[in-house]
Amino acid sequence: MKRPTGKEFDALVTQFAGLQSAAQEAAKAASEKKAAADAVKDEIVTIVKLFGQRHAEASMKMHGDRSTATVTTGRMTRQNDDAIEQLRGYLEQSGIDGARDHFFTPKTTYQLVASPAEAVRSLKAPVRVLAKIRSLVGMCFEIVTRAPSLKVDVPS
C-alpha cells in the first residue's frame, strides 16, 4: 500500500463519514419503524382478544375481509423454591415415614416429583396433616403468563 495523497485521504474520510451517517440514519429509521410495528401489534392483539373467536385453548383468531390474525398466549408453570422448602420442612417435621422420598428427588436443591398429588394420596397420615401438605404443595407452583404471540396471514 502506498501513501495516499491529501485529496485521496480526504475523499476516503468523507466517504466513511457519509456511510457512517447513512448507517446511523438507517438504524434510527429501523428503530422508529420497529416501535410503530410494535404499537400496531399491540393494537391487533387487543382487538383479537376482545372480538376474536376462540381458536384453541390458548388462542384467539379473527378474520378480516382478506387477512387473519391469531393471538396465542402461552403459560408456563414454574416451581416456587421458597414454598418447596416450606413443604420439605413440614414433611420432615411431621415425622411421616418416607414422606420426603414421595415428594422429592435428591438434588442440591429440592425439586418436586412429577405428580405430587399422587404422592399425597399415597401417604398414610392424619387428615389434618394431609390437608396441610396439599396446601403447601399447591403453593409450590406459580402460573406465569407469557407475552402473547401474533401470527398474521395476508394473502398476496
Image (cartoon, rainbow, N blue to C red):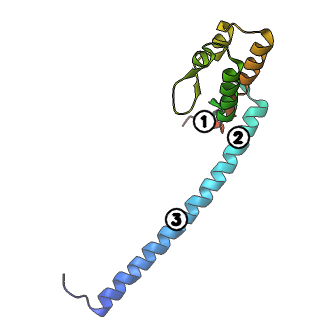
Distance CA(mark 3)–CA(mark 2):
26 Å
**Tag of residue 44:** 2
Within 10 Å of disc 2 (Cα), the crowding (few <14, some 14-19, many 20+) is some
> Residue 126 appears at what percent x and percent y?
77, 9
Between 65 and 20, the one lying in front of the other is 20
Labels 3 and 2 touching (C-beta < 8 A) = no
> Residue 59 appears at what percent x and percent y?
67, 27
Label 1 amino acid?
Answer: Val
Location of the C terminus (image quadrant): top right
Tell which circle, 3 or 1, labels the residue nearer the N-terminal end: 3
**Residue on which the image places disc 3:** 26
Labels 2 and 1 touching (C-beta < 8 A) = yes
Residue projecting furthest to the left: 1
Label 3: element kind: helix
- The answer to whether residue 8 is above or below residue 69 is below
Q: Residue at x 62, y 37 (%)?
A: 149
